Image: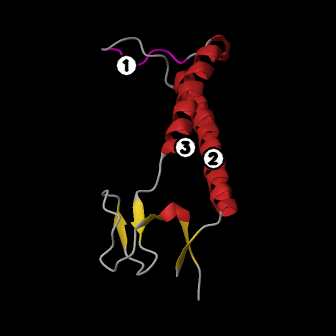
């Protein structure tokens, strides 16, 4: 049977979603930073349209480009964090009959119940 979550459970699920968003943003930052460093170290810097890569960079060159790598990775990590934080489930559920549907601005169920956002509901056994 579907029932509405308590206020404590709603806050707890929001905090969990926020924590997961932060974790994915940090992992995105680390992945992008590592990716750019390894590409420049082993593949080389792009030299134009007709020469897609040049000579691989030395560790000294990579050290001097580190602020660029960090800035780019930070921007991508922040964008990933913000986009994951804003994602909401669009599934609605009727607590009376248990029917699920996607969000469509119609909240009346054919059984007479009202559709609720599934993030605000939880399943409990009778």
Label 3: which secondary element: helix
Instruction: Say whether marks 1 and 3 touch (CB < 8 Å).
Output: no
Range of magenta residues: 50-56
Q: Which of the marked residues, 2 or 1, is nearer the chain's N terminus?
A: 2
Other-residue count near label 2 (Cα within 10 Å), few / some / many at <14 / 14–19 / ≥20 = some
Main secondary structure along the magenta-highlighted residues: loop
Instruction: Say whether marks 3 and 2 touch (CB < 8 Å).
Output: yes
Where's residue 1, x and y in %?
52, 82
Label 2: which secondary element: helix
Task: Work out whether residue 58 can be spotted.
Answer: no
Instruction: Name the residue tied to disc 3.
Output: 85
* Vertical placement of residue 111 versus 88, above or below: below
- Disc number placed over residue 18 in the picture, else none: 2
Spot the residue most to the bottom.
Answer: 126
User: Of residues 89 and 53, which is closer to you in this image?
Assistant: 89
Q: Quadrant of the C terminus?
A: bottom right
Label 1: which secondary element: loop
- Mark 1 to mark 3 CA distance (whole Å): 36 Å
- Mark 3 to mark 2 CA distance (whole Å): 6 Å
Where's residue 35, x and y in %?
55, 31
Identify the image quadrant of residue 99.
Answer: bottom left
Task: Work out whether residue 42 can be spotted.
Answer: yes
- Disc number placed over residue 52 in the picture, else none: 1
Mark closer to the observer (2, 1): 2
Q: Residue at x 57, y 27 (%)?
A: 73
Q: Which of the marked residues, 1 or 3, is nearer the chain's N terminus?
A: 1
Q: Which of the marked residues, 3 or 2, is nearer the chain's N terminus?
A: 2
Other-residue count near label 1 (Cα within 10 Å), few / some / many at <14 / 14–19 / ≥20 = few
Q: Residue at x 67, y 15 (%)?
A: 63
User: Of residues 47 and 36, which is closer to you in this image?
Assistant: 36
Asked if residue 29 is among those painted magenta in the image, a careful observer would answer: no
Instruction: Say whether marks 2 and 1 touch (CB < 8 Å).
Output: no
């Amino acid at each position: 049977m579907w029932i509405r979550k308590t206020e404590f459970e709603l806050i707890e699920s929001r905090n969990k979603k926020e924590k997961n968003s932060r974790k994915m943003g940090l992992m995105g930052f680390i992945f992008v930073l590592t990716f750019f460093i390894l590409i420049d170290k082993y593949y080389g810097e792009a030299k134009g349209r007709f020469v897609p890569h040049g000579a691989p960079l030395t560790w000294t060159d990579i050290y001097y480009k580190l602020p660029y790598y960090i800035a780019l990775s930070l921007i991508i990590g922040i964008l990933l964090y913000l986009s994951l934080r804003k994602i909401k489930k669009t599934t609605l559920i009727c607590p009376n009959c248990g029917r699920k549907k996607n969000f469509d601005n119609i909240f009346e169920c054919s059984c007479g119940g009202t559709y609720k956002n599934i993030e605000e509901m939880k399943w409990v056994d009778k």
